[in-house]
Image: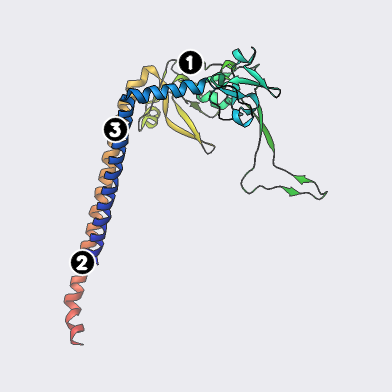
Amino acid sequence: LVLGGLRKKAVERSLLLVDQRTKDERETKYIQLVRQLMENSVFLHEYHQLLIDSLEEDMPTSEEGFRKHPRFVLETHLRTDQAISPLVYKKRPSGVFKGVHVYQRVYIVPLRTRNKWKYMARIVKGDELPNPIKEKRIVQKGQRTFSSNEGETTEPEKFVVGYYGEWQTDPYDPPRVENNIVPRNQYGNIEMFCPEMCPVGGVHIKQPCVERAAKKLGISYARAVVAWEKQYPKYDGIVVPLDFEQLIIDAASEMYSQQVRDEKEKRLLKVVSRWEKLVRHALARIRVEEKYGQKLNHQ
């Protein structure tokens, strides 16, 4: 049975290697084919001509023709997170189709919510109004619509989400580290969604044991929130004053080395204790067999 299992595992491993090798060969052949096509002047000429023809296409004559048209787009076909650039929107559009303005796709700009812009180190201006407005339902787990005693149906609560363009935002103005005190928010941490959000006079350190080192040295620090996952903050490193950067890095490195050594010693002690237990059981079995084995055989 053991030999059969080993033989089966060897066959499966060889098949996996063959599949991986075949996949690599296919990818290599595909890359070679693309390079050959790019080096082929006839292919490049036809490709460029196709692009030129697509950009020179006339305006569609049906509403469905605008949906995937490479050049023109209807204003009503824009998604909630899309808009026409205000520099072009105020000017005359490319045309009108059944009372709807037609614009060129190159003038489409993305829209994002306040939180999305904050992830990109930009803050929405205080007096700006959102462009499109979309309603979303807050439906918690297990929450359903139900009827009250008066016969009225109760639905989940709604909230409005606003989308803003880049022209409605300003670059994020990070706080400053004063008197070697790192600024914190009301929750005792600091948001570090991108490097531009690091406080002036501070530094973001991503290294094991940095928080323990800063706490032991008595240096002001703040845990860095780099993202949100399922409504919970994701922490990665800490923000400390720039003057204590090297001191904290050295202390954290020493703590991490000591932690690795301690974990190695713990694993070694566990291995030794397991071997001792195995040897004790083996010796006990030998003694039992020597003492009672012959009597059991006679019986």
* Number of numbered discs visible in the structure rendering: 3
Give how far apart the Cα atoms at labels 3 and 2 are.
63 Å
Q: How is the image coloured?
A: rainbow
| 78 up-or-down from 28: above or below | above
Residue 32 tag number:
3
Disc 3 marks which amino acid?
Answer: Gln
Q: Label 3: few (<14), some or many (≥20) within 10 Å? A: few
User: What mark, if any, has residue 287 been given in the picture?
Assistant: none
Q: Quadrant of residue 187?
A: top right
Q: Amino acid at mark 2?
A: Ala
Residue hosting label 2: 282
Residue 6, image quadrant:
bottom left
Please indicate whether residue 120 sits to the left or right of residue 128 in the image: left
Mark 3 or mark 2, earlier in chain: 3
Query: Which quadrant does the C terminus fall into?
Result: bottom left
The image position of residue 293, as x and y in percent, is 18, 79
Q: Is residue 116 above or below residue 24?
A: above
Between circles 1 and 3, the one closer to the viewer is: 3
Q: Which part of the image, by quadrant, shows the N terminus?
A: bottom left
Q: Residues within 10 Å of mark 1 (few under 14, many from 20)?
A: some
Q: Assess disc 2: are there few (<14), some (14-19) or many (≥20) residues with their C-alpha within 10 Å of its C-alpha.
A: few
Q: Position of residue 181 (x, y in %)?
A: 46, 19
Type of amino acid at the residue the image marks with label 1: Arg
